[in-house]
Image (cartoon, rainbow, N blue to C red):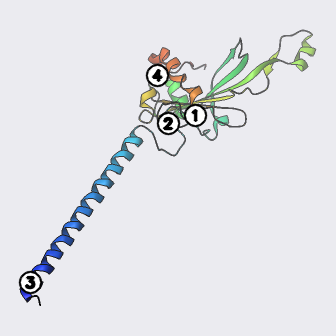
Amino acid sequence: MESCEDCYMKNRFYIVVIIALALVTFILVVRKARAQSAASQSIDSMGGMTANGLETQTNGSEDSPILVTEIPPGYRDWKFVFVAHEAGKLNDIRAILGNDLAIDAYRKGTLPFPDGAIIARLAWLYVPSEENNKIFGHPQSYIPGAQPAWYLQFMVKDSNKYASTGGWGYGQFDKNGIPAAASMMTSCYPCHQAIKSRDFVFTRYAP
């Protein structure tokens, strides 16, 4: 039979082993949690896992930090900024609208635009009006026609989320509200860099 002292030593040994195993397990769990937290913060710092449609890296995937994937509500009630006609292959007529923050910046000449400013561009095919031209007696009246695939575009200002693209997120939608692929939108920022001095915004305000 084991002596009381032998039993005591054996039990003490088991207790020490159990405590050591528990401590090692605790350390491993803490390290894993910290690693996951750091990875999550790294992704979020690049805009990677945000849930409001303006996401992730510029790697040509559907989750791009420049890509706006949700249409801002109420944009058809925004104020007028500018109108233009694009000829050539586009052959469209387009109206530029701005939300209140964008309009206020336009009117005051504020640069850079404040975070939260959104600029919308609506486009229609540029077509003659048969009804009007019958009255005039010759072709002179042109009106908006069908909505092209590039019907609706947005620039959304968020200097933190879109720091890699000058503070602006870009989006394009067809007439059914379906967003364009990220691969189509990667050319937006390089093009807008030509007008960096005006906070990457081409359109001037037409009072």
Query: Which residue in the structure is indicated by mark 2?
Result: 116
Disc 2 crowd, CA 10 A, few/some/many (<14, 14-19, 20+): some
Q: Is residue 207 above or below residue 23?
A: above
Front disc: 3 or 2: 3
Query: Which residue in the structure is indicated by mark 4?
Result: 199
- The amino acid marked with disc number 3 is Asp
Q: Are marks 3 and 1 in contact (CB under 8 Å)?
A: no
Query: Which residue in the structure is indicated by mark 1?
Result: 99
Residue 5 on image: x %, y %:
6, 85
Query: Which residue in the structure is indicated by mark 3?
Result: 6
**First in sequence: mark 1 or mark 2?**
1
Where does the C terminus fall, quadrant-wise? top right
Q: Quadrant of residue 167?
A: top left
Residue 70 on image: x %, y %:
60, 40
- The amino acid marked with disc number 2 is Gly
Q: Are marks 1 and 2 in contact (CB under 8 Å)?
A: yes
Q: Disc 2 to disc 4, how far (Cα)?
A: 14 Å
Dot 2 lies on which element?
loop
Q: Are marks 2 and 4 in contact (CB under 8 Å)?
A: no
Disc 1 crowd, CA 10 A, few/some/many (<14, 14-19, 20+): many
